[in-house]
Image: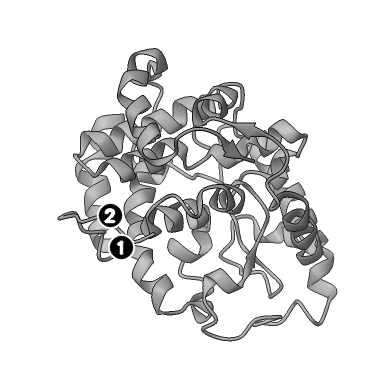
Amino acid sequence: MPLPPSDQNPLSNLEEWDEFLESKYVGSTGRNHEDYRNFDEPDRDSVREFYRLNHTYQTYDFVQQKKADFNSLDRREMTVFEAIDYLDTLVDDSDPDIDLSQREHLLQTSEAIRADGHEDWFVLTGLVHDLGKILCLFGEPQWAVVGDTFPVGCAFSEKIVYPEYFAGNPDVLDDRLNSRLGVYEAGCGLRNIDLSWGHDEYLYQVVKDRLPDPALYMIRYHSFYSWHHEHAYEFLLDDLDREMLAWILKFNQYDLYSKCSVRPDWEQLRSYYTPLIEKYLPGILRF
């Protein structure tokens, strides 16, 4: 879907992103941006164990099986509101920063975007970007739902968080899958590679025909930190990926740095979000 007319521009580079963090979120949350994504000393013990499981079992074959299992979208029909209400019961074990429910995290993200006067589709993206975590509703373990994503089918980068845990992944011993390119070609584009299975790709499949292209990139790749934050896997990118990176950086400043202990009041905010959901994602979604 093409991007609606706008006078808003994505961030052009990482320096602009860092300036934004210093001027806005450090002041509003009382935390330095270095305090976020602190995987060396995470606030919760579950984080390391989560990534040990994630890196051990997210194999190329595992991802192919999950795509076959879930991309038919025949598990359940739900409205956006029903999916958001479900997420009120879920705390993300991979998140080293905070232990609010996922619904509260979604509202913090979308409200931060709205406060800066961005377009309504961008605000909605903040609200729904993690709805794919309803995979947990179908009995999926969190290591197959949340956390940073990374390519499978080629060598695992040292820039992925906790790379040492890939020692237990059988793909590292498979000559088809453990080279720099693996099963891919240089410059093939991210849409032609498989990332570790989780909520990003799942929600993309649910909404791919209903939101603007930058929103879809935000949803599909917002957890691919080793690319958009650490510059790994750039040899796989095509021109569209390089163009859309700026939008992902713009989104991630809100997704990550809006996290704080303030709990948004969903009942007070529903009146704003109801017509917004009806505009872009009305009725029933197939999951």
Amino acid type at image mark 2: Asp
Horizontally, is 140 left or right of 232 in the view? right
Closest to the observer, 52 or 277: 277
Q: Measured from the top left, where is residue 188 in percent x and y?
A: 55, 81
Q: Is residue 147 above or below residue 235?
A: above
Q: Which of 218 and 27 is in front in this view?
A: 218
Q: Where is residue 62 in the image (x, y as percent from the top left)?
A: 80, 58
Do the residues under discs 1 and 2 have CB atoms within 8 angstroms? yes
Left or right: where 214 falls relative to 11:
right
Residue that label 1 marks: 14
- Residue in the picture at 78% in, 51% down: 69
Which amino acid, by three-letter code, is at mark 1? Leu
| Residue drawn where x is 70% and y is 31% of the image | 137
Q: Which residue sits at x=38%, y=73%?
A: 242
The residue beneath circle 2 is: 18
Quadrant of the rendered structure where residue 83 is?
A: top right
The outermost residue toward the bottom is: 186
